[in-house]
Image (cartoon, rainbow, N blue to C red):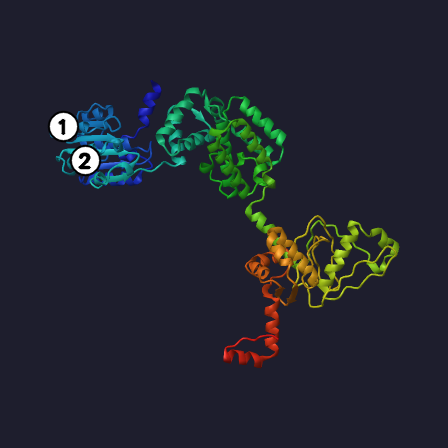
Amino acid sequence: MEFEVTAIRKRPRTLGEMVGQDFVVATLGNALSSDQVAHAYLFSGPRGTGKTSTARILARSLNCEHGPTANPCGTCPSCVEITKGSSPDVIEIDGASNTSVNDVREIKDEVLYAPQSSPKKIYIIDEVHMLSNSAFNALLKTIEEPPPYIIFIFATTEVHKVPATIRSRCQQFRFRLFSPELIRDKLVEASGEMDREFENDALFWIAREAGGSMRDAYTLFDQVLSFSEEKITLTEIREKMGLVGLESTAELLDAASAGNRKRALELLDEILSSGTAVEQVLVELADFLRNLTLLAYGIEKESLLGLSPERFPEGPRKAWDTGRLEAAAEDAFSLYRDIRYSLNPRYELELFIGRLCSLTDRLGPSDVLERITILRNELQSGDWSGDIEVKKKTPEFERSAEELNTAEGTADYRDQEAERFFSTFRSGKKSESPPETDGGVSPDVNVPAAISESSFSPPPLKNLSLSVPDVLETGEPVCAVPVDIGMNIPDAVLTPEERQSRLIGEVRRSNLSIGTALEKACRWEWTDHTLLLIFNSSYEASVVKNEVETLKRAGVSAGLPSFSVDIRTEALREEEEENSESPRVELIRQVFRGQIIKG
């Protein structure tokens, strides 16, 4: 067939015709020129990078009538036989099909016989990593000390599976992937040989799809040639191979970047209705987002993008920054991994498109940090421009008695009373009582001057919000604070009876027996941060004394400051008072080790 003849012409015949593997060409060329050829070679690298072709070129270079030479003639009987694959002295073995130790033993027996018509007897074992450990062990001694006319050439795509004992006895050459530009140039040469017109973007697409493999590129190129008519175009490739198409993908992402969900989902329905699989749509969306991300980085290399930068729409490039594009691409990859377990892949794809439509509103970590920083600076400087409506209130002393009576009992009235209460703490002054009215008097709270804003902060409140004036009398701006009229008042304001009632109520909720014993205390004395409890009975005193930690926790729950507990009986207290009044009597008791008897 005509194409098969073209394919043969595309294969290199000499080391000089090889491209993309400069290190391999230079090293093997110098070894052939100086006649310092090793007895074993190991060629490793990805598929389609020329490992087997290089092995055949090396075999021709060694067995050519004019060899060893880096440029075999290609016309002598030996070169012709090697090219056709019929040379008795060049044996190609598939390592995947001959993995047993018996196959290697046959090789060991054959190496004892000299070549028939060539200077060297060459064994080319492809995919050598597929050999078993026993086969490798059987081959080890032969590789280490082969006859002078034997050359081993191993080729593998997974060099890490080859035992180190084998690798150490071979000269190793690592083959690299071909660049997209180089693959495109070779496809241009092939198109010229076949007199076929082409679009540059079409050949670039083939080169990128090949993934650095020249063999994959030629295979895909052969497929494109089979359905292309006069000219190889990217549009025809996408139509015939069931791809989404650049224009459809660009239009879909353009609608998503504009936030037009209706248009984006309609375009998606058109793409899926044309027979394109959900997975293929995701693949092309991910590739397109990847290219947009590279453009956002400032990369416009055509071989890396696969297309010229002008062919990408401006909408997504302007609407989405680098962080949003990276997030969208990551979502596409995650969906592709998870879609195999989905109950409805199409629905998940539609949800993904919906999220793309709101991608502009998505905040990344840097955006959140920036907004927090701006808000903090505004709060510190007092220039906070939050959308909070602050109502200016009329001072109570300027309001009539009728207005106060009308407002009393309402939420606004409670707001005003709480605001006046907190204003007192901020200013450190005693609040002034408002004038009496017919409906009653506004409650006035006497607050010690020692209590200030720095020593008191209101607890969390509920169900009622309060708007505080922008600027207090001091001129310092404050934020609106929610206030609950039923909140806990500072300990300095509570009376001892109120403290006692709160503590007993809290204890009874957690432990009824301790609360009952606590109620039998005949005297409560609060001094600084100490609570003195005096009982008539030693039994109740011991019960409460064993639960001192319970009392402390109940005090915290009741909103009281932390305190220590001292528990005594009435008899012990009288004894201590009497002893404190008569230190001389106590001294005598201690000296004579006696006991004080009351008369």
Query: On the rendered structure, is 250 left or right of 117?
Result: right
Residue closest to the eye, 346 or 466:
466
| Label 2 with label 1: CB-CB less than 8 Å | no
2 vs 1, front mark: 2
Q: In the rendered image, which residue does mark 1 sit on?
A: 110
Percent coordinates x, y for residue 18 in the rendering: 30, 34
Percent coordinates x, y for residue 163 in the rendering: 24, 38
Is residue 559 in view?
no
Q: Is residue 386 above or below residue 224?
A: below
On the image, which quarter does residue 122 sit in?
top left
Quadrant for the N terminus in the image: top left
Residue at 47 percent across and 25 percent down: it is 237
Q: Earlier in the sequence, mark 2 or mark 1?
A: 1
Mark seen at residue 137: 2
Residue closest to the eye, 86 or 60:
86
Which amino acid type is marked by label 1?
A: Glu
Q: Secondary structure at mark 2?
A: helix
Which amino acid type is marked by label 2?
A: Asn
Percent coordinates x, y for residue 358 in the rendering: 60, 37
Query: On the rendered structure, is 245 left or right of 5?
Result: right
